[in-house]
């Protein structure tokens, strides 16, 4: 049976050790904050892990999984104890991604007049970057001579190389003044926040009359799907997206339209 922790028993020391362990293992700031907040609530509750998990039973599947992994990390890496609780929920079924057509992508760019906003769209679609990668991309990551983007701040600190599309290159040539530091910065010279990028994409979709739910990740989904429909090898797409597992990339085979249309021609 998992041990129960009393309130105020070395809580500060335990949370401090948790932060150290997260940093040593290079967890992202967001995940670290999430784990820290969960563990603080757990320590204050005085409950066993099972009872604490039960208190989240009315929450979403992803929330419960997050609490589970936070407690598991805490027990195994901070307390050096075996975490005996089993995963409370099976992994949720993966939903098919929303994908825009090529004409819808074109309309996004046509209705967007702000150059910086166009670059946000272009980095998401023509390079397939994640939102976090769009925010942190620097001029020195782009090799204009070799026509590639060398991502050094990719998810999980795994570097990858992406082609530099001509349409993206043209926009950067029009925009590039300093050619150093972050490509996208606010008027105060700070890094774009996530909300700003999400709003840019949302506004463009609204102006273009697109009724689908469009997010920055929708453009990344469209990037992968359009490459697959054009005949690109799925393993190359996996490398471009920075997916660790090919299974993650294979989700796009379910939404690629060319093979589906070819089946229709058989009737």
Image (spheres, grey):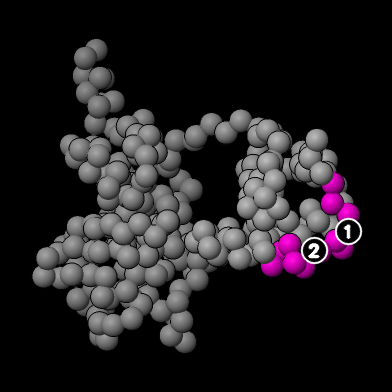
Callout 1 touching callout 2 (CB < 8 Å): yes
- Residue reaching furthest top? 267
Q: Alpha-carbon neighbours of circle 2 within 10 Å: few (<14), some, or many (≥20)? A: some
The residue at 25%/64% (across/down) is 150
Which type of secondary structure does the marked residue at label 1 adopt? loop
Q: Is residue 54 left or right of residue 169?
A: right
Q: Which residue is mark 2?
A: 11
Q: Which residue is mark 1?
A: 7
Residue 6, x across and y down, in percent: 88, 54
Answer yes or no: is residue 233 visible: yes
Camera-side residue of 248 and 201: 248
- Look at the picture and state if 58 lies above or below 44: above
Camera-side residue of 22 and 187: 22
The residue at 42%/42% (across/down) is 98
The residue at 69%/67% (across/down) is 16
Q: Which residues are magenta?
A: 4-16
Q: Is residue 118 left or right of residue 192?
A: left
Residue 132, x across and y down, in percent: 44, 63
- Residue reaching furthest left? 145
Question: Could you give the CA–CA distance between mark 1 and mark 2, rounded to whole angstroms?
Answer: 8 Å
Q: Quadrant of residue 43?
A: bottom right
Residue 78, x across and y down, in percent: 67, 55
Camera-side residue of 138 and 98: 138
The residue at 48%/48% (across/down) is 213
Camera-side residue of 222 and 7: 7
């Amino acid at each position: 049976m998992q041990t129960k922790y009393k309130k105020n028993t070395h809580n500060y020391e335990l949370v401090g050790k948790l932060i150290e362990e997260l940093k040593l293992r290079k967890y992202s700031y967001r995940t670290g904050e999430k784990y820290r907040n969960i563990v603080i609530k757990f320590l204050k509750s005085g409950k066993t892990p099972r009872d604490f998990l039960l208190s989240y039973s009315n929450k979403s599947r992803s929330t419960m999984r997050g609490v589970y992994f936070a407690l598991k990390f805490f027990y195994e890496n901070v307390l050096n104890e075996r975490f005996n609780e089993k995963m409370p929920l099976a992994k949720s079924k993966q939903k098919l991604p929303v994908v825009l057509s090529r004409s819808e992508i074109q309309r996004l760019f046509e209705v967007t007049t702000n150059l910086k906003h166009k670059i946000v769209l272009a980095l998401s679609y023509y390079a397939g970057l994640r939102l976090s990668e769009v925010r942190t991309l620097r001029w020195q990551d782009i090799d204009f001579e070799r026509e590639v983007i060398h991502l050094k701040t990719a998810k999980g600190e795994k570097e990858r190389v992406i082609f530099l599309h001509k349409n993206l290159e043209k926009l950067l040539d029009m925009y590039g003044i300093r050619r150093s530091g972050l490509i996208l910065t606010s008027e105060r010279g700070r890094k774009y926040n996530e909300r700003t990028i999400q709003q840019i994409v949302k506004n463009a979709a609204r102006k273009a009359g697109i009724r689908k739910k469009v997010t920055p990740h929708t453009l990344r989904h469209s990037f992968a799907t359009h490459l697959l429909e054009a005949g690109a090898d799925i393993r190359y797409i996996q490398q471009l997206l920075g997916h660790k597992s090919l299974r993650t990339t294979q989700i796009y085979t379910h939404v690629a339209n060319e093979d589906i249309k070819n089946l229709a021609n058989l009737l």
